[in-house]
Image (cartoon, rainbow, N blue to C red):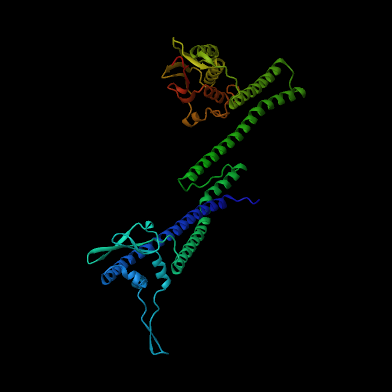
Amino acid sequence: MMRLNITHRVFLAILAANAIIVLFMFLIMQWSMDRGFLRYVNQLEQNRMERLATKLGKVYGVSKGWGFIEKSPDTISRLITETIAESSPPLPPPVVNESRQGLSQPEPPPSRLSYRFEKRIIVLDAGKNKVFGTSDPSGIELFKPISNRGKVVGYLGLLPRKILSDTHQLKFVKEQKFVFALTALLMLLVAAAISLPLARLLVSPLKKLAAATSHLSSGRYDIRVTVDSDDEFGHLSRDFNALALSLDKNEHARRQFVADISHELRTPLAILGGEIEAIQDGLQDLSLESISSLQVEVFRINRLVDDLYQLALSDVGALAYRKADVNVADILAEAVNRARPKLAESGLALNALMPYAPVVVYADADRLAQLFDNLLDNSGKYTDAGGTIDVSIESGAGYVTVNIKDSGPGVTEEERKKLFDRLYRVEGSRSRSSGGAGLGLAICRNIVEAHEGAIEALHSPFGGIWMKITLPLSSGKQ
């Protein structure tokens, strides 16, 4: 079975719609022609009736009554023939007959027309008694009065036509119907000629989108479509371009992510391999110091793999969250107490301002503790010695805000936008002994978003970075 493409389907749909419209127009015109022409013929006969009524009134006056109908039955036929001749178009001038050297008069109107008209005539006297006609007077709605010298002497009625029966009239109607049919056919052909280019024009944007989608599915994320309208196709084209741009960015991020992960893993593995090879070759003794150095590199690899695992779980939503109403101030205070000794060793001052009243949120206490530990550890690593870290909590309007502000060094606006990107570090040359793999803040963002909150990096008033976390309060405490 042949499958039609979208262009042919649209073409057939437009053509079918036009064909239905043309068909209905043709049928309505046919019906209107039949009804209208029949009404026109009946109106002509009504006009003829007025002239016939006038002639009957004159004959009635000459004959002193209706007795002339019985004495001379052909009188009605003669009068009808005269009215038909009067209502007919002007006859052509007489033609000279060269063979007889005389004038050849045109033939009178057909007698059968008079006969058909006569068969439907009814004449009533002043008392409405039938004096002429074979039809039933009940079928006549309107009688025309017959007057003589201002006095009504009778009534003339005509049974209206129900159908056309005259040959000339039927021929005329047939010719008109043929013209209507020919017009309908021409309209249909014109519609077909217009529908195909119109269908191609309508489907053209869809074909462009289909071709671009095919390229996109094959990995060409740089493909774009031209937006040249503001209709549904224009909106679809814009959405397609946005999708292609997003896929392009994601593909670039994926490649960068793989490259960065490879680099992060290759460095400790290279150190491990070099030290083990040095021990095997006898260049380095197997001692507690060398084993400790190997253990440090193994710990770094394990930490990176664990961060990747945590990030992957949070991405797919498989990271376990056991939420309950918890006091976020207590969780933050415990994180501050855990971080204080290490920060003091680095020469950093930690100031914490906690509210006395409980600040209740619906959250996973362990994940919030992981969030605060990561943020405090991050501030401790990247704040210069002698600096300050300020921690505070604010609540109101259904939300609680946790602020972690540190002193310099600061970062630029462009760098702050990338802090939550995976494997991003402000300084590419930063030592891995102090900095991590650049996954901690990405994990923090996933934890916050899992609690329907938001996290953003702002410029700290102390010259460093201000981490602002917003979480919704528990419904029972808002």
Nearer to the camera, 462 or 81: 81
Q: Residue 256, relative to residue 8: is it above or below?
A: above
Nearer to the camera, 189 or 300: 189
Q: Residue at x 54, y 45 (%)?
A: 224
Q: In which quarter of the image is the C terminus?
A: top left
Residue 356 sits in quarter: top left
Q: Residue at x 47, y 58 (%)?
A: 26
Q: How many labels does the image show?
A: 0
Query: Is there any visible trace of residue 76 in the rendered image?
Result: yes
Determine whether, in the image, residue 284 is placed left or right of residue 174. right
Residue at far top of view: 356
Determine whether, in the image, residue 326 is placed left or right of residue 5. left
Query: Is there any visible trace of residue 79 in the rendered image?
Result: no
Residue 32 sits in quarter: bottom left
**Where in the figure is residue 430, as x and y percent of width and height?**
57, 26
Nearer to the camera, 121 or 378: 121
**Where in the figure is residue 421, as x and y percent of width and height?**
55, 29
**Where in the figure is residue 391, as x and y percent of width and height?**
47, 16
Q: Residue 375, relative to residue 223: is it above or below?
A: above
Nearer to the camera, 12 or 142: 142
Residue at far left of view: 150
**Where in the figure is residue 450, as x and y percent of width and height?**
54, 23
Q: Residue 432, relative to residue 245: is it above or below?
A: above
